[in-house]
Structure formats: C-alpha cells, structure tokens
Image (tube, helix red, strand yellow):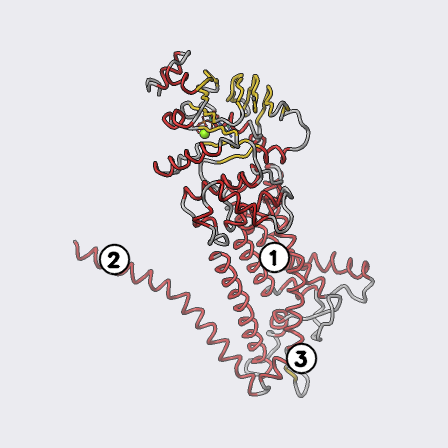
Amino acid sequence: MANLRKVKEFIIEKLIFTSGIASIVFVALIFIFLLAEGISVLRYVSLGSFIGGQFWYPISDPPKFGILPLILGSLLVTAGAIAMAVPLGIAAAFYIADVAPVKLRNLLKSCVEILSAIPSVVLGFLGIVILVPFLKHFLHLPTGLTALAGSIMLAFMALPTIISISEDAINAVPREYKEGAIALGATHWQTLTRVIIHGALPGIIAASMLGIGRVFGETMAVMMVTGNAAVIPTGLLQPVRTLTATIAAEMGEAAKGSPHYFALFAIGIVLFVISFLINLTADFLLHRGKNR
Amino acid sequence: MKKIEVEHLNLWYADFHALHDNTMSIREKIITSLIGPSGCGKSTLLRCLNRMNDLIEGVRIEGSVKIDGEDIYQMKSGLTALRKKIGMVFQRPNPFPLSIYENIAFGPKVHHMAKAGELDGIVEESLKAVHLWGELKDKLGKSALGLSLEQKQRLCIARLVAVKSEVLLMDEPCSALDPLATLKIEELMRYLKTDFTIVIVTHNMQQAARVSDETGFMLLGELVEFGRTTDIFTRPKDKRTEDYITGRYG
Ligand SMILES: Nc1ncnc2c1ncn2[C@@H]1O[C@H](COP(=O)(O)OP(=O)(O)OP(=O)(O)O)[C@@H](O)[C@H]1O
Ligand SMILES: [Mg+2]
C-alpha cells in the first residue's frame, strides 16, 4: 500500500519534472535548428556583409544577401508603432482605471478586448482598404503603402496588450496611496502623476515591453501595408520591408538547401536575437523598478 | 473658540441612512474623541469634516459643517485648500511609495508652498515636530516603505505638519500599532495639540479617556452624547452611554 503510493508519487514527480524541462528542451531544439540552418549562409557571404549589406537581391545572379534594409525596416516600423501606442496606451489605461465612470469603464474594457481579438490578417485587410488610400490621398504620397501605415497597424495591435496590462498595474496600486494624496489636498491629476504612477511603473514598463515584443514579431498586417521594398528607409513615408515579412513572403519560393533558404533562416536568427534582447531589457527594467 | 460646527448632519450611502441628525461643536486646539461600537458611523462622521466622502459614489449629505464659520458644503471651490487645512491620518499608515524626503515634500509641492531651497527646511521642521528627525536625518533618501509602523504613522502626521494643516483628523491612528507605539503616538498628540485641533476616532475607550478633552459617543449613526471627557466617563447623562462605557453594550 505504502509502496504503491511511493511509486505513484515518484511517477507524478518525474512527470512534472519532464513537463518543466520540456519547454527548455523545445527552446533549445528550435534554436539549434535555426542556428544549424542559418549558419550555413556564411558559406556564401561574410557576417559583416550579411548584417551590414545594403542590398537584398536573393534571386539575382550573383545573389546579394544584405539584410541591413530589412533590419532598419523592422526597427523603423516598430519604433513608429511604439511612439504611437505607448503614450496612447498608458493614457488610455489611466483613463479606464482611474477616471472613467463605471459604465463607460466597462464599455471601454470590452472594446479593448474586442480590439485584441481582431485577427492580424483582418486588420491588415482594413489597412489596405482604408488606411493606405487615406494616407496616399491625405499626405499626397505616390503610394500609401509605407512604413507609417505599418506603424499605425502595429500600434493597433500593441494597444490592447499595453492598455490591459498597464490597467492591471494601476489597479493594483493600493487605494490608501490615492486616499492619502487626496486627503492632503492633491488634485486628481497630481495624485495620478505623482503617486499612483510610482506604484504602477514596473507594470507599465512591462506592458510597454510586451507591446514592443508583440509588434516586432508581427508579420501579416505589416506585410500587407508596408509595400515591401527592400531599400534602406530614410523616413516613415516610404515603403519598407521588415525581417518578418521577408521570411513569410520568400520561404515558399526558396529551394530547400539553396543559399536563399539559408539566408532566410539566418534572418530568423537575427529576429530571435533582437526579440531576446527586448525581453532581456524588459526584465532588467522590471527588476530595477522593483528594487527601488 | 469653536473650530468646527456640525449642525443637523445627515448622511446616506445610497439608501442606507448612516448619520442621523448629528450636531456637535469642536473646540480649537484640544483633542476631541469619537467613540462607539463598530459600524456606528465614527469614520463616516470624521470623513464628512474634510469631505473625503465625496469620493464615494452615491453619498448624499444634508445639514451643515462649518469650519471657522464657513460651511464647507456650500463653498463652490477650494476643496484642495480645505483638505490641506483639514488633514487626515488613516488607520493603516499610508506613506507614499517615495523616499522619506519626498513624502514630506509632496504636500508643499502640490500646494506650491515652497520656493526651491525652502523644502529642506520644511522637511526638517516637520520631522522634528513628530520627533523623527534624529532617527531619520541620515536616511531621507530611503524609501518610506521600509520604516516601522510607528515611524510610518509619525511620517504621515509630519506630512500634515508640512502643509500647515490646522486640524488633524485621525481615524483609529493606533490600531495597527503595538501598545508601546500607541502610547508614544498619544504622547505626540498631546504635544501637538498646542498647535493643532485634533479629532480622533477610536475603538479604545481607555485611549479616549487618556488622551482626549472632549468626547462624543455614537450609536447606530446617532451622536448620543457629546461633552467633556471626564463627564462622559464619570457621569454620563444618557443610559446608552453609561451601558457602553461600563461594558454592558456589545
Ligand atoms: N462606502 C460605504 N457604502 C455603504 N455603506 C457604508 C460605506 N462605508 C460605511 N458604510 C456603512 O455605514 C455604517 C458606518 O460605517 P463607519 O465606517 O462610519 O463606521 P465606524 O464607526 O467607523 O466603524 P468601525 O469602528 O468598524 O470603523 C456602517 O454600517 C457601514 O456598513
Ligand atoms: Mg471606522
């Protein structure tokens, strides 16, 4: 009897252990696979001219595998999205958490949830049909398929994450802080900006970083509205191409084992590394916020 | 001198009638305590005096509260000035998640009371007034959240000293503290009453007897009896007061 229980416990313990380890193993496997396939690109091009090369002509003869335009395209679109989504998201979170009357608050929260439920293809579709012509017409551009269009789409996608996580963080700030500030004669605005924000800051930073991560890895909506021209971008009002869109668009046509195929995997590694750096920064900022 | 006059004050939380026709006047620079069983409306009455009940949705108030002769429910503006003048200390000490220095500087800053360079002096004076300066003068940059409960409560009082509050409303300021800390805060109250008008809500009848000059006894939203503390405790006029202070009531 006692023995049976011991065996049972032993099995359960090992099962839990395995599940825990599995995630590590998967990550390792994915990374090894990516690395193994991607590293082969160095047979055709040096690391410096891969990362720093200005031309991405994967199927011309001879091919050129320079991904600098793609990296810059990704960074530009992401930066544009963040510049819009972070301030807007934080302001919206404060409004929902602390200013809006109860009924409006619930309505707004449902809207944010719906926004996060829109598939990115659908958002991209709306982007092509509405946003792109609008930008072209309104800003008198030769084409509306621009980095700006991508940034706006991505801002929409990052907003729900930023709003809902920031809002949780604001709500988690103890009520006593607010009462204390109000009782000292601080205005609502002073209470928000001088007290509540200090309690909520780590959560707000985490929310923003998660939003950035979400935006950087996004593919579909960006591919549909940015025009996908692999040139070094000089401004938001030009077509650009991102790392993600490049992989998604070209993977189907690259022959397995060809230089092009390896180059796409190498782009995957670059994406992986940048995403990893974003997460690392988030972690660092979060801990610094907590230890203060 | 009368500092606060409450006249025929009624308060409803939505449909619940929480204060029944309360009338009392609070004299300047003495300690007034409000006692009574749990849920009788002590905190509610106290929060009427700095209009903190305004924050609660569905509250309705009738009657008047005059401070220095002015009805605080009739004035159209100046709510922040009112709350600066009528400071509040809470049951759970609630310093902000800022440094000790910034906790004290917060009030003077939001009320634009100090020029650059004057803040240091205000912080020092305020901490001295609550006898914290000696302990904390070398740790002003540290987070206030790391202090002991008693220090936190003193810091919260110092925040009010810093904005030159005239009245200190204290809602069970010692109930989170141990007996020794409680005695020390009481001592501080006695010391502060030369400059401040203090109103304290307490569960603890001995505390009311020890520290206060006048006492109000509340029951089920009614202010049953109000008068000199010695009278309330030695010869109460109302049978219900007598039952309560002799321990015959819940
Ligand atoms: N925000 C609120 N909404 C509805 N009812 C409330 C609210 N706050 C207090 N009450 C009710 O009003 C009555 C008086 O509450 P109050 O907190 O003033 O009592 P108290 O004397 O301070 O009690 P305690 O000694 O427990 O602190 C209680 O019956 C309470 O349930
Ligand atoms: Mg109370």
In the rendered view, tell whether residue A55 sits above or below residue B21. below
User: Separation of disc 3 and disc 2 at Cα?
Assistant: 57 Å
Q: What residue is rendered at 59% in x and 51% in y?
A: A163
The numbered disc on residue A158 is 1
Left or right, residue A87 beside residue A133: left
Residue sitting nearer the eye, A59 or A232: A232
Look at label 3 and name its amino acid.
Trp
Tell which tag, 3 or 1, sits nearer the viewer: 1
Are the numbered discs 3 and 1 placed on the same chain, yes or no?
yes
Q: Mark 3 to mark 1: distance in Å?
A: 29 Å
Mark 3 nearby-residue class (10 Å; few <14, some 14–19, many ≥20): some
- Give neighbour class at mark 2: few <14, some 14-19, many 20+ (Cα, 10 Å): few
Q: What is the three-letter code of the residue carrying label 1?
A: Ala
Q: Decide which of A59, B45 is in the foreground and name it.
A: B45
Residue underneath mark 2: A9
Disc number for residue B229: none
Q: Which residue is mark 3?
A: A56
Which of labels 2 and 1 is toward the front? Answer: 1
**Within-10-Å neighbours for mark 1: few <14, some 14–19, many 20+:** many
Above or below B164: residue A249: below
- The location of residue A275, given as percent across then percent down, is 55, 68
- Spatial CA distance of label 2 from label 1 is 44 Å
| Circle 3 SS class | strand
Left/right placement of residue A157 relative to residue B155 reads: right
> Callout 1: residue from which chain?
A
Instruction: Output the chain of dot 3.
Output: A
Q: Are marks 2 and 1 on the same chain?
A: yes
Dot 2 or dot 1, earlier in sequence: 2
Name which residue lies at 69% across and 75% down. Answer: A230
